[in-house]
Image (cartoon, rainbow, N blue to C red):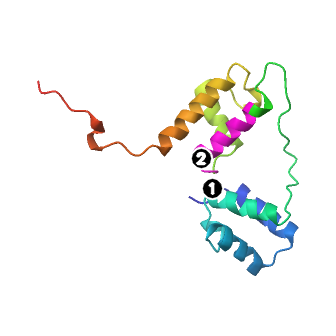
Amino acid sequence: MALPNSKTRILHVARRQLGLDDDAYRDVLFNAAGVRSAKDLDGTGFDLVMRRFAELGFQSTSRRKPLAARRDMASPAQVQLIRELWAQFTDGQGDDRSFGKWLDGRFKVSSIRFVSRDLAPKVIGALKAMVAKRAAPPAAPGGGRRKRAV
């Protein structure tokens, strides 16, 4: 699955900030994730490349700040865990928009910033279950159940 354009743009921002020419950039892609082009990266590869860029000195200039502690709302630690679980479930492909759609469909909350202290454990539990289910080996053909003869 191809990276979203937003993540490809982040790669290019990092490349420019680090002053990497095309060959050096492709070397980082290959050494970190085994690809020669950002088009071939998946979510895990993106994370590996970004980790390497951070080792080389890249620092994000994004204005997105972590949510501060707010009364009766999910704690910053809960918000961070929720974001990490969503990234894990989506292989790093999920963004705030797709997460908001999932939250709205499941919990009738449009954004992570509206997740209450009481709702946060339910969101975390649902995401943990989804991650575990995705990681589980596929079931045997027929679902493992035997049909009763009538």
Amino acid type at mark 1: Gly
Residue 108 appears in the figure: no
Residue 32 is left or right of residue 126, and the answer is right
Q: Quadrant of the C terminus?
A: top left
Q: Main secondary structure of the magenta part?
A: helix
Compare residues 9 and 135 and report the one nearer the observer: 135
Residue displayed at 28% across by 44% down: 141
Is label 1 in a helix, a strand or a loop?
helix
Q: Residue furthest left?
A: 150
- The image shows residue 3, relative to residue 146, as above or below, that is below
User: Which residue type carries mark 2?
Assistant: Thr
* 2 inside magenta stretch: no
Q: Residues within 10 Å of mark 2 (few under 14, many from 20)?
A: some
Which residue is under mark 2?
Answer: 90
Say if 120 sits above or below 83 in the image.
Answer: above
**Which residue corresponds to mark 1?**
43
> What is the quadrant of residue 46 in the picture?
bottom right
Q: Quadrant of the N terminus?
A: bottom right
Give the x, y percent position of residue 84.
Answer: 68, 42
